[in-house]
Every structure is written in structure tokens, then in C-alpha cells.
Amino acid sequence: MGKFIKKALLLLAPLFVLVFCYVITDPYQNIFERDTYLLEYMMLSRGNVSAKVYLKNKDKYKYDSFIFGSSRSTAHTAAEWSKYLAKDNVPFSFGAWNENIEGMYRRLRLIDSLKSPIRNAFILIDVDHTFTKSDTDKMADFASDHYLITGESKFRYYVSGFMNYIENPKLILTSIDYKLFHKQRAYMENFVHMEKGDLDPVTNDWLPNSEKTVLRDTVAYYKASEHKFYQRPAVQIYAKKQITPKKVSYLHKIAAILQKHHTNYKIVIAPLYDQVKLNPADLAILCRVFGRQRVYDYSGINNITNNRFNYGSDVTHYRKKAGNLIFKEIYR
């Protein structure tokens, strides 16, 4: 019996080592509570981080106003939004990378289930994937969203994180190396250089690539990305109809929660560089569900999308100055 136990422990030793490394490095920051959830060497799942920051701080700060949307929603900061809200409102950025309409509903549902108020809501719609992406579409290098959002068990949430870790040898090496030496190596691809101050620990505003970075040398910033700003069609192009009956059901569920809370809300269709305009049939659905007076369509060819200086170096995201302009217009 003793020999069997020794052999079993010997065989399981690599697994124990991997578990130890995973816990100590905590690469997805799921194990230990933190003041700020970010990593220098890897981009974390914003949806996961948003949920954890909200759950950690909701009783302390009494959030009652929320920004929902994909990575484009980071152009709309809670700090800027607060200028247009009542003085006693407390805004929170509840976005997620690649967010879809089901994800927005699930976040609203979580807030509602915790009996927290939703006095104001800013919901950002992307023409290219809010209604085309499903919850099963995962980015391979991102940890899963929070279990209270996905509906998974807590056990599966932690196991999934560990399985993602052991299936990525480069992440294992990077996490251990950086934990020990805090140095960037040549093999560390896609090093994100996240630092304290890039994520607001209270509002959850995402702050890297701020206006200061662009304005420091605007000419050099855009010259380096000149080739990315492709030519758009001179005539208006419309997206295909995307809102299926299933997506309509999520829209109605969102509307029901907002009505329950007597929320003052705005639905904004994002001004994307490609200038593809939301399909008129889809726009009609949004207006029918939420009310035409609450829907603001910035997609397609307009003053914001015509100005390439409203976009960051990756072209797919617009800058905070465009986000600020939208706030100013819709709350005018």
C-alpha cells in the first residue's frame, strides 16, 4: 500500500506543481481579491473584471448608473458621464470585450437580482457584433466571464481557468518568469504593459491610450498607423438585418428590467470607422422596444465617422473625445 501511494504521488507530482504555479501566479486573477485587476503581461477578460469589481464595491459605493457595451464602450467613461447625471448618482463602467446583447442582459439581470438600483443606463450597440456574436464565441486567450454572468457553477469557473492555464505552455512560462523577475522577455508576445492607473478601481473606467498619449505627438501617432485607415465607400452601405426573434427577446428582457427600475436610459449605436449603417429594420426594432426618443444612431456616414482623428491606432475603436461628444449631444 505504501509503494502504491508513493507511485501515485510521483505520478501526480507534475499536476501538484502546475496547481501550485497556477495559484501563486494567479494569471486570470480569479483566486485572490485585488485592489485593481490588471496584469502587465496579459489582457484580462473585462467582463470578468467588471463583475468582480462591481460585486466587491457595490455596497461601499452604492452604484446606481451603468455603462454597458463592448470594448468600444471604454470611450464613454463613467467620469465623463457623471457630468450629465444628478450629483448623487454613482456611475460604473460594466463593459466586456466583445460584448453581445445577451451579455448586456445578463449583467442587468445580475444587478437586478441583487436588488441594486438602476437609475441611469447607457447601452452601446455595435453594428458589427452586438447581434451577431453568441455567448459561445470566446477569444482563445481570454479567461471565461464571471460565473454569475455565464450561469456556470463556481467550481467549473475555477476549473476552466486552470484548464486554460495548463493548455497554454507559453502562459505558464510567462506567469512564472514574470512573477519571479518582473521583466519583459523577447518571447513574451502581446505584452500589454498594463500599469496601475490604467483601470480606475472605483468606476472601472478603462484608461490606457488616453487623450494625453495621442496629444503628446498627434502627427507621429497617426503617421505610424496611416496604412490602417483604409478608404471607405463614398455611398452609404447598410448592414444586413441582424436582430432575430431570439435577439428581440433579449431586448424585451432588457427593457423590462429598465422599466422595473424606472431607469433613465439611452441606447446608442456606435460610430464605427467602417461607416456601415445599422439596417433600417433593426433600427425600427430598437425604436419599437425602447422608444424612438431613447435611441441615437451614430452608425454610417456622419461628422464623427468622417473624421479619422476620432479613432485610435487600431481603427476599430473610437477615441474618448468622440465618446465625450456623444455624451454632450445626447444629453443636450
Image (cartoon, helix red, strand yellow):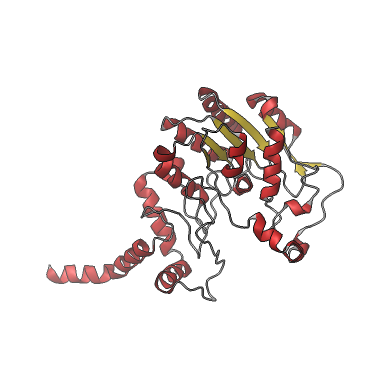
Residue 303: horizontal and vertical position, in percent? Answer: 80, 43
Q: Is residue 244 visible?
A: no
User: In the rendered image, which quarter is residue 191 located in?
Assistant: bottom right
Q: Nearer the viewer, residue 37 or 7?
A: 37
Q: Nearer the viewer, residue 100 or 208?
A: 208
Residue 251 image offset from top left, x and y in percent: 59, 30
Residue farthest left in this picture:
1
Q: Quadrant of the C terminus?
A: top right
Residue at the (32%, 65%) spot, across then down: 20
Q: For the N terminus, which image quadrant? A: bottom left
Furthest-bottom residue in this view: 186
Total numbered labels placed on residues in the image: 0
Q: Residue at x 63, y 26 (%)?
A: 290
- Name above or below for residue 116 compared with residue 310: above
Residue 267 coordinates in the image, percent (x, y): 64, 33
- Residue 173: x and y in percent read 44, 71
Q: Residue furthest front?
A: 87
Dividing the picture into quadrants, the one containing residue 61 is top left
Q: Judge whether residue 213 can be spotted in this image.
A: yes
Is 35 placed left or right of 212 in the picture?
left
Q: Residue at x 67, y 52 (%)?
A: 317
162 over 285 or under it: above or below = below
User: Is residue 300 rendered to the left or right of residue 73?
Assistant: right
